[in-house]
Every structure is written in C-alpha cells, then in structure tokens.
Image (tube, rainbow, N blue to C red):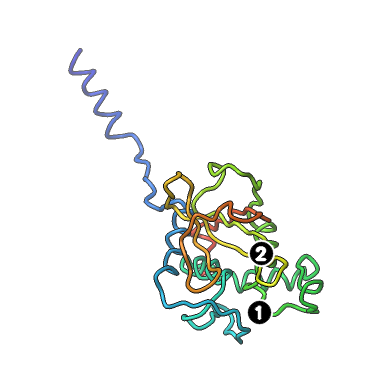
Amino acid sequence: MRILLLLGVLIVVFCSPVVAQSTEAPFGQELSKAASKSLNTDIHYNGSYVSLEYPWGDVPETQGVCADVIVRAYRELGIDLQKRLHKDMKSDFAAYPSKEVWGLSRPDRNIDHRRVLNLEVFFARHGESLPVTDRHEDYLPGDIVAWNIPKYGGGRTPHIGIVSDQKAGNGRLLVIHHLSGAPKLEDVLFAWPQTGHYRYQVPLSARDR
C-alpha cells in the first residue's frame, strides 16, 4: 500500500504542468531604474527649442528639462513618447492645450512631447489618472507626478517627475526630476501643489522596439 501511495505522489510531482516564473521586473521598477540614468550625468537644464529627428528624436545628451527625464526614461524601455504623443495629437489635436496655451494650429513633433501639459493629457488619455493625495503610501515607483511650482518673478510653472524606488529617511519615496542645474533625486513628492498623478505602463509585447 505504501509503495502505491509513493508511486501516486511521484506521478503527481513529475506529471504536473510546470508554470514558468516571470523574471521581468514590475514596470514601475523598470521605469524608476531607467529614469535614474539621468542622475550623475553632464545634463544641464536647457529648454531651448531644437529640431529633432522623428521618431526617436532627442535633444543633445548634455541638455534637457523635466519632461526630457520622462521621455528618456521611457525610451530606455523601448517606448517612444515623441511618436506616441505626436500620433495622438494628430488624431485629436483639440484634446491638447497647444492652441490655447502656445497658439499652435497643428502638432509639432519637435516640442509637443517635451511639454508638461501635453504629457499630462497623454498619460490621462492612455494610462491611469490616479488620485492626488497627501499619503505617500498611494504612490509607487514609476508613477508620474506633475506640479505647479512657483517661478522666479511670480506666477507658477508646470513641472513633472518620476517617483523612484528609493526612500528618504521619513519613508517617503524620492522623486527624480529636473528643475535646474542637473537632474536630481529628492524628497519633493509633496513639495508643491500637485496637478496630476499618473501611471503609464506598456507591456513588452506593445513596446516600440
């Protein structure tokens, strides 16, 4: 009887289907790691208009603004926000603030994806628009956060960053962003009034390369 029971156990063990374990990191972790490549570089803040290649166009590697941190992080994962946002604007230009804010009458693939307000619209349309809260537990690595921050001379200006997977001493996740000088990793999640909280994730099978 014991022999029969042992044979039954062996049959179950060796004949059961093997479930492959995914070794792919969660998308947010991937994006956080990709964004961190902007840190400790020779990139300096420069928002000058530049004529870009299309697709996969980028400004010179030594310059950029806050939006370029986002664009470059996604590009590291094979996702071209320049192309994706340009195609979306071509299909529904009125959904974006380009006419009201910048007086444009058509998409401009050189600059549209480098503007915070456009990125906010794109992420809301094609990703998840999540609640803006004052609870750091509601934010995950790879989340996109946008703010309205005070600017020199008065008024406010849009700003955007990526939540990292590293924490401050208070347990709050640090943010990778580029406000001046070089890109930084800082505890600024709640430093300014948030205008948006987004999660835009693209599976491997749907990436651009």
What element does badge 2 sit on? strand
Circle 1 packing at 10 Å, graded few (<14), some (14-19), many (20+), is many
Image location of residue 183, percent across then percent down: 48, 69
Q: Residue beneath label 2, please?
A: 150
Q: Which residue lies at the image location 54% right of the left edge and 56% below the top edge?
A: 188
What element does badge 1 sit on? loop
Question: Within the image, what quadrant is residue 127 found in?
Answer: bottom right
Circle 2 packing at 10 Å, graded few (<14), some (14-19), many (20+), is some
For the residue pair 109 and 24, the one nearer the viewer reads as 109
Image location of residue 50, percent across then percent down: 60, 85
In the picture, the disc for residue 109 is: 1
Name, please, the residue furthest toward the left.
Answer: 3
Marks 2 and 1, how far apart at CA: 28 Å
Q: Which residue lies at the image location 42% right of the left edge and 60% below the top edge?
A: 33
Q: Nearer the viewer, mark 2 or mark 1?
A: 2
Q: Which residue lies at the image location 67% right of the left edge and 73% below the top edge?
A: 86
For the residue pair 198 and 134, the one nearer the viewer reads as 134
Q: Amino acid at mark 2?
A: Pro
